[in-house]
Amino acid sequence: MRKFWSIFLTISIIVTIFSMAYCITVGYRINRDIDSVISRATIAASQEDMTEHVETLKKNMEQYEMTTGHIALVYKTSLTDLSLHYQTVERILERLEGIREMGEERVAHQLALEDLRRVLRELPRFEIRWVWIHYAWWMLIINIILWIITFISCPGEW
């Protein structure tokens, strides 16, 4: 029985470490490709820079399939609806094209850019929520089950 317990304990530790490493790796990529791009767009100095960052954001959202669905398991609202956030990004790009027509020296140009910065700041940060929805919740359940089986398999060891 002791051998069975030690094998199960080893498996539980390995699965837990793998799960954590995987979620951290995926979370880093989402943070780098989505959240950081939003942050860079909010501090862009010119319309061209902001357009470049928002186009990158749109491309990355499409790459990670963040164009539909929700970033919530239970309480799904308009704040968690990815399709609405994707539409917002598309509208920001449309507004940036309209701003291009204005001269940079005009006050209206700077006010329009500042308004878009505020909109970008209000976008939720996707990393934690997206990783939780796609990977972390079921990895957590698997790990809990493994650890419960490990503790039950040999209670005299503790």
Image (spheres, rainbow, N blue to C red):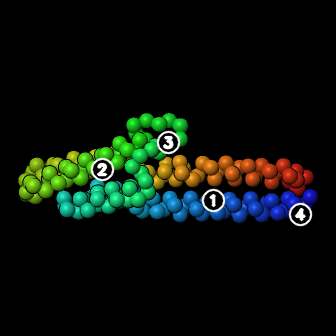
Q: Name the residue beneath numbered marker 2.
A: 89
Quote the CA–CA distance across marks 1 and 3.
20 Å
Give the answer, above or below, for where 75 lies relative to 116: above
Secondary structure of residue under mark 4: helix
Secondary structure of residue under mark 2: helix
Quote the CA–CA distance across marks 4 and 3.
41 Å
Sequence-wise, which precedes: disc 4 or disc 1?
A: 4
Give the answer, above or below, for where 20 lies relative to 94: below
Q: Name the residue beneath numbered marker 1.
A: 19
The three-letter amino acid code for the residue at tag 1 is: Ser
Q: Position of residue 62 (x, y in %)?
A: 38, 56
Secondary structure of residue under mark 1: helix
Q: Position of residue 113 (x, y in %)?
A: 19, 52
Classify residue 101 as left or right of residue 29: left
Numbered mark located on residue 72 in the image: 3
Give the answer, above or below, for where 138 lies relative to 10: above
Quote the CA–CA distance across marks 3 and 2.
20 Å
Classify residue 28 as left or right of residue 118: right
* Circles 3 and 2: CB atoms closer than 8 Å: no
The three-letter amino acid code for the residue at tag 2 is: Val
Quote the CA–CA distance across marks 4 and 2.
56 Å
Secondary structure of residue under mark 3: loop
> Residue at horizontal 73%, vertical 49%?
145
The three-letter amino acid code for the residue at tag 4 is: Lys
Circle 2 packing at 10 Å, graded few (<14), some (14-19), many (20+), is many
Q: Name the residue beneath numbered marker 4.
A: 3
How many marks are shown on the rendered structure? 4
Q: Position of residue 105 (x, y in %)?
A: 7, 57
